[in-house]
Image (tube, rainbow, N blue to C red):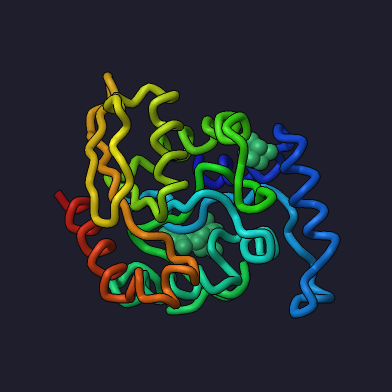
Amino acid sequence: GDVAALDAAVTGCRACPRLVAWREDVAAHPRAAFRGQEYWGRPVPGFGDPAAGVLVVGLAPAAHGANRTGRMFTGDRSGDFLFAALHRVGLASQPTSVARDDGLELHGVRVTAPVRCAPPANAPTPAERRTCGPWLDRELALVAPRVVVVLGGFGWQAVLATLAEQGWAVPRPRPPFAHGTEVTLRRSGAPDALTLLGCFHVSQQNTFTGRLTPPMLDAVLRRAQAIART
Ligand code: DU
Ligand code: SF4
């Protein structure tokens, strides 16, 4: 359907010269552990239920994770933590996500990002974030989720900036990121509100230190499911 067409279209995007060069350079230099694998090295489309009530977003694909496998959050420790939680709360068919052909299906949830290409130092520029904004906007329009779970403060800032540019009524000053925070946004002409739900990022920095525990992530996902059902 339309979401599949969007996914195919974004995969061919070359609008950000610095990110095109970086994603391809990383792909040409696999990590030792992945030597011999063919890296994706392209924009990463969203993955999961095309009519999801819940969208989960980070900031951008990881160089040796999604930029390698071609599927959001797939192939690194962050994804291990996230997909295990999605499986515990009943949104994923399997607890692991290792490759595009591993048979995983998501139901009621989709994972995507406000920036689709792996950036140097995990840091897209404001211009790159702006250039990529219309892809997220189109995905939001087609999928029409009720909730966006935003992982981490950088993703939070990127999503709020993108939504403001795309016509959503974002308060000024912008609501700050916090774990568990909820902000409900409207866009004139749009029938449904969109709730942003903040969550600490699933990076090892947070999960190894206990800043984000499995029960904390499960609670955020269950809250998102509850909002999506209303
Ligand atoms: O070919 P397809 O049914 O559009 O699925 C493409 C891709 O998306 C496949 O890897 C399963 C996944 N997917 C999913 O995770 N959840 C859905 O509800 C539909 C598709
Ligand atoms: Fe295109 Fe987005 Fe990648 Fe820039 S970051 S090249 S806009 S897909």
Q: Is residue 50 visible?
A: yes
* Residue drawn where x is 17% and y is 57% of the image: 226
Q: Nearer the viewer, residue 156 or 106?
A: 156
- Which residue, as the protein is rendered here, is positioned at the far front? 209
156, above or below 79, in the image: above
Residue 116 is situated, as x and y percent measured from the top left of the image, at 60, 46
195, above or below 53, in the image: above
61, above or below 77, in the image: above
Quadrant of the picture in which ligand 2 is shown: top right
Q: Nearer the viewer, residue 46 or 195?
A: 195
* Residue drawn where x is 59% and y is 55% of the image: 61
Q: Is residue 9 visible?
A: no
103, above or below 157, in the image: below
* Residue drawn where x is 43% and y is 79% of the image: 95
- Which residue, as the protein is rendered here, is positioned at the far left? 230
Q: Picture quarter containing residue 38?
A: bottom right
Residue 125 is situated, as x and y percent measured from the top left of the image, at 61, 36
Q: Picture quarter containing residue 70?
A: bottom right
Q: Nearer the viewer, residue 164 or 71?
A: 164
Residue 179 is situated, as x and y percent measured from the top left of the image, at 28, 56
* Residue drawn where x is 22% and y is 64% of the image: 222
Q: How many marks?
A: 0
Q: Nearer the viewer, residue 148 or 182?
A: 182
